[in-house]
Amino acid sequence: MGVRPGSRRVFALRRVPLKVIGLIALFSAGIIPPFIFLIYSSLHQLDSSGAFGALTAANFATVFNDRALATTLINSMLYPLGAALVALTVGGVQAWLAERTDAKFRQILYVAAIISLGIPYVLYIVAWLLLLSKAGPVNAILQHLLGGAGPYINVYSLGGMIFIEGMLWSPLAFLLLSPVFRNSDASFEEAASICGAGVFSTLRHITIGMVRPALLAFGLLAFIKASEAFEVPALVGLPGSRRVLTSTIYQTLTLNIPPDTGSASAFGVLLLIVMAVLLHIYNRVAARTWRYQTVTGKGFRPRVVRLGRWRYAAGALIVAIPLVVIVLPLATILWAALLPYYQPFSIAALPKLGVANFVQVLHSRSFQASIVNTLLLGACAATVVTALSVVAGWCVARRMRGGAVLDTLAALPLVFPAIVLGLAFLQIFVHGGTHIYGTLLSLIIASTVAYMPYGLRYAQLGVIQIHPELEEAAAIAGARQGTAFFQIVLPLLVPAMISCWLFVFLIAVRAVSLMLLLVGPDSQIVAVTLFDFWNNGQVGELAALGCVWTAIMTVFSVAFLVLARRYQLPLS
Amino acid sequence: MLQVENLTKLYAAEDSGGIRNIAFEVATGEFYTLLGPSGCGKTTTLRSVAGLEEPSNGRVTLEDRIIFDFDRGVFVPANQRRLGMVFQSYAVWPHMSVFDNTAFPLRMARDRRWSKTDVQRRVMRTLETMGLAALAGRSAAQLSGGQQQRLALARALVGEPRLLLLDEPLSNLDALLREQMRTELRRLQKEVGVTAIYVTHDQSEALALSDRIAVMHNGAIVQIGLPRQIYDQPCNAFVATFIGRSNLLRGKLLERDQQHARIATALGPILCKISHSAADRLPGAALIRPEHVVLKRPDDRAGDGAVNRFRGRIVQVAFLGEATECVVQVGDVVILVRGATDQYDAADEVDVFFPPERTSAITEDA
């Protein structure tokens, strides 16, 4: 028997327990095939019937002979870097204002950030494209102010991509960073002011210094998320010929007939390697960050900086940020939804406003179907993920034998950018001998695998909050392990489970990238419908469907906020 | 009743409370205490007896039945050992009522099916003993610290366990409540007649409650004995300083016979009684409790010779309510004296006298 670190196993387990073996088998079945199929298809030709043919290196040759590869790689570095900086700056300023100052209207920031969680990526990006387009209001205003001829802003550029992706991520950056500012212990700052430091030098030397590791960790996370983002590169980058790896994969699939899945897979493998390296770095940074996490004890209270006269200026900023990040884009969408065909905002267009788009959207069977499909997809994926991750999270958090394997397996999907995972599942469903390609079931399976890591983190945090002695007491009282789980652990996990469910639901229905390659005619979902609308130029229908959907999602995201606050659960 | 032999549990991190070759026996009805500083392995020992840890070696026998034997591969899981345990955090289930918390062990019982009325009767009787009957319907989350503690005890006792395990149950209570619960715990244990193992780092708790004490240090038991034995005849310097306040004068053995030893210390030679537990080892230190040191005016030569008497100066006098304590500087050594020292003031020149029958020769370490 080996020497093991201080485990707290209640029940005698010399072997790996059956439930852990079962979960390991299940998780392996979910995540190993995508790796195999992606690598296999990157190394094989497709024959004329569309089946896998001979072994080849041609796909990788295509990748490395791509003349634009160097530019693509440089873009793939610059774009996430810029986006991470924008998100971190906008989110960080909000977090500091909301948590550490007495600025006016701080609550607005939370409401705005939570509402933004329900807005589909495509809808949000389209809103900015409309605002910043050549004929859009922003260029019009600039032209009016500065005179001259040309449009001043070309949104279809690297700068445009960075700006929109940064805006897209800023609410989450705010939600993730605000606990960091909230939890940094004020006594360090008080010590600094006793040493004679003023408000701003304290902020510069102490506060920023204390939150710097967290800023670095979240900056890296934003960089990773932007690296694997698909929506902005596809909708903003491709029209302006600014390619990154994710959009190159999509282009390789859509520009050729039949789709060149081999080369796309080869790009996918390349991206997978990049992600694995980035995630490895992130895990190391994040692990070090824990050392700085301050434990909040009794009587802990973060000190609030008195801004004095600046209080109202800060209040204005607090109103302005959500105005730009949320209200302006949503207003643009609403405007577009009310017009029969899109035109920029003007007084002259006012008489044309009407609800025709809404009527059409709400009456169309296919739109109804896509809304129902999406809700079903989200609900099923969230339910399966929550159920599995509660048991798995318990096994991992209680350090059962095999728990570490389970933990690693469940985290593996994180290396897959959604578009690559979609591509891998596409090939599984097409070549894997099943007939579920294009069905809602296939979408649910892909989502479950993709969002398992998030569910597991939630469940693990939930279990960790339950003192192990509560279970040990049940064991001493004569309860079997299963009884202890169902009668003690599960009831105490309910709040964590509900908020885990809502979180997975929200992220599962929000993105288009995972679903884009997988949907079939009978499994249309809202995010993909919006994406197709934009490519077809149906801005009115897009906006109307987007408004309806955002309204539905707001109910879910507000429920999530209320729960997360009441039970003090982390927001991500 | 309970026999623990050769019990060993090792952890990867060496300072995290592993135990080596722990052996002790507990008699029926006894209140047995494992006492030691944090990290000494006392909780690991208790959890191994409970079945919450799987030891790396050794054997545990409860009422003539082996519940753990590493060599034979026997491990009776915690839920089949029929024990009662009170946890440090109480581990009261917050989503259940007081009644349901207490009834849980009965509902889980394997050897007997409890009818609803029997459960009702037994739980209410136990709750009455604990003074919780009025709160039976209340949610356990609404109880105060002291009430949670009594609920945990009720839950541990309701199934008439073969052995009651207590893991620092008083450490989360405030001082006044702790004293109250201490008395009550002792009374209940004797009343119910249950055998108990009690884990604590608080020596005054251990001395007040226990029938016998096993003092632990660095994963091993250093001394087992009655509270008075442990206090009066500590086997080594660790036990002497850990239990009670003491003046420990380290030095070298000059000479010894069966009963007495003379030890050379920084003050000079000191005549001591040889402590029972150090009988067959070479003592290297003299120990005297503060309340046994006698203060004398330098001019008071009545009654004794010059043995164990040293000239010093009072540095500080502290009034503690029930007693007075003063600190005497003797050469380079500071001697703590407790008792009737009212007539002395700081800066007074005094003699300290260590009565040889109250001064023990002990070993430096185990």
Image: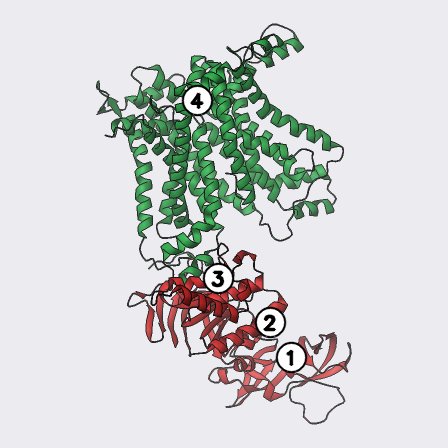
Q: Which chain is red?
A: B
Which amino acid type is marked by label 1? Pro
Label 1 and label 2 in one chain: yes
**Marks 2 and 4: which is nearer the front?**
2
State which tag comes first along the sequence, 1 or 2: 2
Image position of B4 (left or right of B131): left
Name the kind of residue labelled 3 in the image.
Phe
- Please name which of the two marks, 1 or 3, marks the residue nearer to the observer: 3
Mark linked to residue B290: 1
Contact flag, marks 3 and 2 (Cβ < 8 Å)? no
Q: Secondary structure at mark 2?
A: helix
- What residue would you read off at disc 4? A244
Kindly state the secondary structure of the residue where label 1 is placed: helix
On the same chain: label 3 and label 2? Answer: yes
Displayed quadrant of residue B117: bottom left
Q: Nearer the viewer, mark 3 or mark 2?
A: 3
Chain of the residue under label 4: A
Q: Earlier in the sequence, mark 1 or mark 3?
A: 3
Q: Are marks 1 and 3 on the same chain?
A: yes
Mark 3 surroundings: few (<14), some (14-19) or many (≥20) residues within 10 A: many
On what subunit does the disc labeled 1 rest?
A: B
Q: What residue did someone put label 2 on?
A: B180
Q: Is residue B112 left or right of residue B220?
A: left
Q: Amino acid at mark 2?
A: Gln
Q: Spatial distance from mark 1 to mark 3, Cα to Cα?
A: 49 Å
Identify which residue, B244 or A119, lies in the foreground: A119
- Local packing at callout 1 (Cα closer than 10 Å; few below 14, some 14-19, many 20+) is many
Query: What amino acid is found at the position of numbered circle 4 in the picture?
Result: Val
